[in-house]
Image (cartoon, helix red, strand yellow):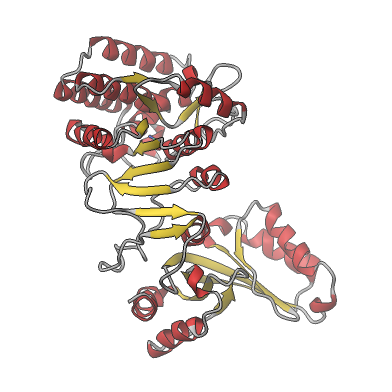
């Protein structure tokens, strides 16, 4: 559908009446903002807990918060959810009695184990959407509540990690083409073929927005959140880092790491297939244009951002003659695969190879892996190296641009930081330097100053 914008508002954008009022203003400013996907109320203050967390806590008899070492009982969570929705409705002056009754009934269903965890986890989005829809209508924006069950958003029965089933796209297109005003849609869940509610992984309302944008071939998917966009580096580490105005899907994928996690990656996959641009915007700062994620762009800079990953380990193996052994690296990676461990990079040479992975993933399997590798590969040297940080400059402007790696290496040399691992991505739009964790902050600062200033 041309000139149709899907807008998704995250938890902090709908955390209280004041925020929901901002959402209303944003919707009124542009008639093309017709499909509004909402999260459950998130944290209004840093001490707050998200409604979804309280709901999961109720559904798991308190295990959810206990596992985070938080002393919040199911009774406290129950009270917090009811109070949150009560204050939302009273502050927005929307009729509340029937919503309160239905919410309470749904909570009781989950407590009596009549329904799965996913059902209760989804109630934050479900009822928040209904309240927001009522509020829009009251404010003169004709709106319709469209639930996943109404529009045939069908998902797999991988509870808490559901995936959209392709038949959904036609269902969604048909249903939404008949909506006259604004469609207000709860994010985060869909229906299984057996009629159960199943939720996506956490942060999954992004995914609902992305799938709807794909289904209706939206002209734009706006993702409204509480930051000005995607920054060149994590602004908690480099406060003067700037928001990146435009990025390609490929670049954001390469940057995905700590500090770049403002957007659920799965939500991008289908938008990319249909070239639907995604704009990350700040509900609290309309002056910022945010970050636009597109298929192609003409780069004005060489490096657009630097990703950082801490707590990396690398497995180092050397064996004379490995270079002539067909399938050596394949066989080695198969061992890691058998332990279900994700691997990141594999710098290789004639007779040796390093495999980079997250060191937390080795906990409990390290001795077994060592024994298996020593038995099956008979290495001359085999060791685990821990506490590595990788810094990965990214940018499509880097391709065919001489000297970027030299500049980054010089910046580290000036700080007397030894590089343990170097690897260039084969698309030549990223490279990775690995060194001891203790140098991470000074290395990031040095590379930022040299490549992004
Ligand atoms: N409310 C869900 C969560 O907290 C989904 C979302 O907000 O995207 O994970």
On screen, residue 316 versus residue 20, left or right, reads right
- Of residues 237 and 397, the one nearer the viewer is 397
Q: Quadrant of the C terminus?
A: bottom left
What is the x, y in percent for residue 195? 55, 16
Q: Quadrant of ligand 1?
A: top left
Q: Which residue is drawn at 43% across and 14% down?
A: 112
| Image vertical order of residue 270 relative to residue 198, above or below | below
Residue 92 x %, y %: 17, 24
Number of marks present in the image shown: 0
**Which quadrant of the view contains residue 169?**
top right
- Looking at the image, which is closer to me, 64 or 253? 253
Name the residue: 20% across, 42% down: 45
Q: Nearer the viewer, residue 117 or 139?
A: 139
Image quadrant assignment for residue 163: top right
Whether residue 390 appears in this view of the structure is no
Rendered position, 407 above or below 238: below
Q: Nearer the viewer, residue 25 or 74?
A: 25
Query: Residue 41: where, in percent of width, then height?
Result: 29, 32
Relative image position of residue 282 (x, y in whole percent):
28, 48
Left or right: where does residue 260 sit relative to residue 317? left
The residue shown at (41%, 35%) is 4
């Amino acid at each position: 559908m041309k000139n149709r914008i899907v807008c998704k508002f995250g938890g902090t954008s709908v955390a209280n009446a004041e925020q929901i009022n901002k959402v209303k203003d944003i919707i009124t400013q542009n008639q093309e903002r017709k499909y509004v996907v909402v999260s459950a109320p998130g944290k209004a203050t840093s001490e707050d807990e998200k409604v979804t967390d309280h709901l999961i806590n109720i559904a798991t008899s308190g295990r959810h918060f206990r596992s985070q070492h938080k002393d919040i009982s199911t009774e406290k969570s129950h009270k917090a959810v009811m109070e949150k929705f009560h204050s939302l409705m009273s502050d927005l002056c929307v009729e509340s009695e029937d919503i309160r009754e239905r919410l309470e009934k749904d909570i009781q269903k989950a407590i009596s184990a009549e329904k799965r965890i996913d059902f209760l986890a989804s109630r934050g989005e479900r009822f928040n959407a209904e309240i927001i829809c009522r509020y829009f209508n009251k404010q003169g924006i004709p709106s319709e509540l469209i639930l996943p069950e109404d529009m045939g958003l069908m998902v797999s029965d991988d509870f808490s990690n559901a995936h959209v089933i392709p038949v959904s796209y036609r269902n969604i297109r048909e249903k939404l083409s008949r909506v006259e005003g604004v469609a207000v849609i709860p994010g985060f869940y869909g229906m299984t073929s057996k009629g159960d509610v199943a939720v996506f992984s956490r942060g999954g309302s992004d995914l609902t927005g992305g799938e709807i944008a794909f289904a209706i071939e939206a002209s734009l998917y706006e993702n409204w959140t509480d930051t000005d966009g995607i920054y060149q580096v994590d602004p908690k580490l480099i406060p003067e880092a700037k928001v990146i105005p435009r990025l390609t899907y490929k670049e954001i994928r390469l940057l995905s790491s700590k500090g770049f996690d403002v957007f659920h990656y799965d939500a991008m996959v289908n938008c990319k297939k249909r070239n639907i641009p995604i704009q990350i915007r700040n509900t609290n700062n309309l002056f910022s244009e945010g970050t636009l994620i597109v298929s192609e762009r003409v780069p004005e800079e060489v490096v657009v951002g630097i990703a950082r990953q801490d707590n990396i380990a690398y497995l180092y193996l050397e064996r004379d003659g490995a270079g002539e052994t067909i399938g050596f690296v394949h066989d080695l990676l198969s061992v890691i695969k058998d332990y279900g461990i994700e691997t990141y990079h594999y710098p290789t040479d004639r007779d040796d190879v390093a495999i980079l992975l997250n060191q937390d993933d080795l906990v409990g399997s390290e001795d077994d892996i060592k024994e298996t590798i020593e038995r099956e590969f008979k290495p001359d040297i085999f060791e685990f190296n821990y506490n590595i940080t990788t810094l990965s400059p990214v940018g499509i402007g880097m391709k065919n641009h001489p000297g970027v790696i030299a500049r980054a290496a010089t910046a580290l040399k000036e700080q007397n930081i030894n590089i343990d691992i170097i690897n260039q991505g084969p698309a030549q739009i990223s490279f990775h330097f690995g060194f001891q964790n203790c140098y991470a902050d000074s290395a990031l600062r040095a590379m930022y100053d040299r490549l992004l200033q």
